Image (cartoon, grey):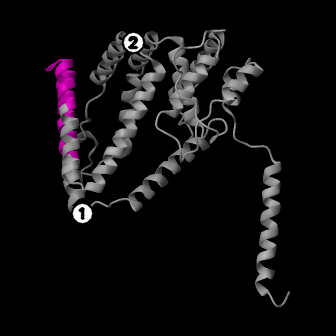
């Protein structure tokens, strides 16, 4: 053994690694399957339904495509019966009510492990993308900063015109779209070809996710029009930019705590109106559409669905399976 001193260092580490791998393989996976998550809200799932739900998998992160979760949510909704969908929605409403009670009591909801994990992963992915991708020069950053500030001011002015009734909904929509195009043109004007390619790839991912959501929900034209009307009404009733002068001290420093409390009180005053809008939006959707949204949010709170990497189910296909 003395002729090979490196073995004294490597063999213990190798043995420990093998023992750790064996112990890990003997332990059951702590990752809950899709059926386990849904069973928390719908406890009467049959064994057949559980098998069907666990067959719906999202690929590993490397192979995942935008909108995959929407396809899984739509297919999962097809597996549930009408009574089970009603139970799922009742559990969702109860959870929303509890969150509202905590907010009215002034309690600050704690960030769960899943939320912290997603936030951390998002920050790390963003940092890696910025570190590994093309970097903006100081001139580019300054030009982009000025463009964003100008666009923000124009957007606030446009919303205020819409809120006051100076312009109608059609004019507001067309001008909002023009502002978005203007901002995109400004970003492209201050970007390198590689940066433009990354922007286009990001836009393609957003478009794919939006298309998957629309395919999963299958909103009718009438539903889309009603939803857009509610969105515009939410913009109209949203509070305008606050007047900061009451929150400045003698030295011109902003009292951020007082401003936050004032904004919180403003949101509480509008909570009934927001709830009314939410109920109107709920009344537009079918139970199946509401269940698809609820299941998508349920999966978004978890890291993975089912046994990732075993393949991906497509969208719901040519027709919906009949309710059992």
Q: Secondary structure at mark 1?
A: helix
Q: Secondary structure at mark 2?
A: loop
Closest to the camera, between mark 1 and mark 2, is 2
Q: Quadrant of residue 218?
A: top left
Q: Are marks 1 and 2 in contact (CB under 8 Å)?
A: no
Image vertical order of residue 58 relative to residue 148, above or below: above
Q: Is residue 247 magenta?
A: no
Image vertical order of residue 119 relative to residue 12, above or below: above
Residue at image point 67% right, 22% down? 41
Asked whether residue 96 appears in the rendered view, the answer is no
Residue at image point 39% right, 44% down? 257
Q: Is residue 166 magenta?
A: yes
Taking the view exactly as shown, the residue that stands out farthest to the bottom is 3
- Seen in the image, is 97 located left or right of residue 170? right
Which residue matches tag 2? 220
- Seen in the image, is 57 located left or right of residue 289? right
Residue 29 badge: none
Which residue matches tag 1? 138
- Majority secondary structure in the magenta region: helix
Q: Residues within 10 Å of mark 2 (few under 14, many from 20)?
A: few
| Numbered range of the magenta stretch | 148-177
Measuring from the top left, give residue 178's x and y in whole percent: 18, 33
Choose the circle earlier in sequence order: 1 or 2. 1
Whole-number angstrom distance, CA of label 1 to CA of label 2: 47 Å
């Amino acid at each position: 053994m003395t002729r090979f001193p490196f073995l004294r260092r490597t063999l213990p580490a190798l043995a420990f690694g093998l023992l750790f791998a064996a112990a890990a393989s003997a332990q059951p996976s702590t990752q809950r399957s899709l059926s386990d998550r849904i069973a928390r809200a719908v406890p009467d799932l049959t064994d057949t339904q559980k098998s069907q739900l666990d067959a719906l998998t999202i690929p590993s992160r490397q192979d995942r495509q935008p909108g995959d979760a929407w396809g899984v949510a739509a297919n999962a909704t097809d597996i549930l019966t009408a009574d089970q969908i009603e139970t799922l929605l009742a559990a969702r409403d109860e959870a929303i009510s509890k969150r509202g009670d905590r907010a009215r009591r002034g309690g600050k909801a704690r960030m769960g492990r899943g939320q912290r994990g997603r936030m951390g992963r998002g920050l790390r992915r963003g940092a890696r993308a910025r570190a590994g991708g093309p970097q903006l020069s100081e001139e580019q950053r300054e030009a982009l900063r000025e463009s964003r500030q100008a666009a923000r001011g124009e957007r606030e002015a446009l919303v205020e015109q819409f809120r006051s009734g100076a312009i109608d909904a059609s004019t507001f929509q067309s001008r909002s779209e023009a502002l978005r195009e203007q901002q995109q043109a400004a970003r492209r004007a201050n970007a390198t070809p590689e940066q433009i390619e990354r922007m286009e790839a990001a836009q393609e991912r957003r478009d794919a996710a939006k298309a998957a959501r629309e395919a999963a929900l299958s909103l009718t034209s009438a539903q889309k029009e009603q939803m857009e009307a509610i969105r515009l009404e939410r913009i109209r009733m949203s509070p305008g930019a606050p007047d900061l002068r009451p929150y400045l001290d003698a030295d011109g420093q902003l009292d951020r705590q007082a401003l936050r409390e004032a904004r919180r009180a403003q949101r509480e005053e509008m909570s009934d109106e927001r709830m009314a809008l939410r109920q109107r939006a709920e009344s537009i959707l079918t139970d199946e559409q509401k269940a698809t949204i609820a299941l998508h949010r349920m999966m978004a709170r978890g890291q993975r669905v089912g046994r990732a990497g075993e393949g991906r189910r497509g969208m719901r296909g040519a027709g919906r399976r009949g309710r059992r």
